[in-house]
Image: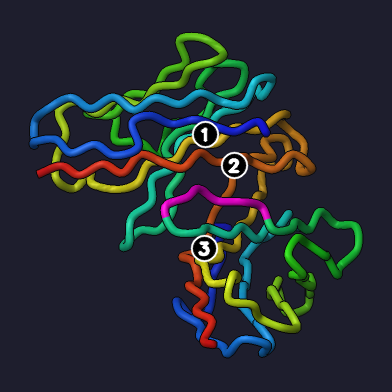
Amino acid sequence: DARVTQTPRDKVTEMGQEVTMRCQPILGHNTVFWYRQTMMQGLELLAYFRNRAPLDDSGMPKDRFSAEMPDATLATLKIQPSEPRDSAVYFCASGPEMGSYNSPLHFGNGTRLTVT
Amino acid sequence: AQSVTQLGSHVSVSEGALVLLRCNYSSSVPPYLFWYVQYPNQGLQLLLKYTSAATLVKGINGFEAEFKKSETSFHLTKPSAHMSDAAEYFCAVTYFYNQGGKLIFGQGTELSVKP
């Protein structure tokens, strides 16, 4: 059963440290999304890619966050430097086809980030 | 701006009782609507979706939702709750038709099922 894989599952780090979260989308999916989930804000879209090209990263704090897709099997989300307010669960999701409402997103199990 | 509002952050029902989770959307154009479920420590799974075909949509695990344009609603129902239905439920809308995956989520409703 194909699934989106995220690593690490949990990450605890100190303020100021760099954090890298990784996502392996489902093979053949050409869209990748990063969402952040917090109690206060709920689910927020940070960035999304189509065919490895960033389409929209307006939800991401540009000064400290960056998202890339080095290849079709890997998406990364980096925070440098991290701050306590970045503590959240970060979800990666992939979809098989852009432009089709019949193509639901498949979510990974998330990376729970705690910045102390 | 387009948005989704879920009424009630927490709903509690008894096992066997009707489940009703409310979702209203705000959109200036016809939306595509979704319900996702999130179990503890897991990602979101698609329950069902409305894509302008039938207004009554059936999903997995016995859930269904009805799109009512006049009420701008897409409430989720299940006739008889099961203990395994306890989870958080998210209503979502996409309004970029050529970017079908860009979902705007509601704040979520946590469903508790009492024995």
Residue drawn at x 24%, y 36% is: A11
Residue type pointed to by label 3: Gly
Pointer 3: what residue?
B106
The disc numbered 3 marks a residue on which chain? Answer: B
CB atoms of marks 2 and 1 within 8 Å = yes
Residue B72 lies, with reference to residue B41, above or below; the image says below
| Residue drawn at the location 62% of the way across and 16% of the way down | A51
Q: Position of residue B74 (x, y in %)?
A: 71, 71
Which residue is depicted at the point 55% across and 41% down?
A107
Give the quarter of the figure containing the C terminus of chain A: top left
Quadrant in which the N terminus of chain A is drawn:
top right
Using the image as rendered, state which of residue B106 and residue A73 is in the foreground: A73
In the picture of the structure, the residue carrying the numbered disc 1 is A33
Q: Amino acid at mark 1?
A: Phe
* Residue A10: x %, y % from top left: 29, 39
Distance of mark 2 from mark 1, alpha carbons? 8 Å
Q: Is residue A7 left or right of residue B82?
A: left
Q: Respond whether the residues carrying marks 2 and 1 are from the same subunit.
A: no
Highlighted magenta segment, given as a residue range: B41-46
Q: Secondary structure at mark 2?
A: loop
Q: Residue furthest front?
A: B115
Foreground label between 2 and 1: 1
Percent position of residue A73, x then y: 54, 15
Report which residue position mark 2 lands on: B102
> Please, which chain is the residue tagged with disc 1 on?
A
Mark 3 to mark 1: distance in Å? 17 Å
Residue B65 makes an appearance in the image = yes
Please give the label number shown on residue A41.
Answer: none
Q: Which quadrant would residue A78 be assigned to in this image? A: top left
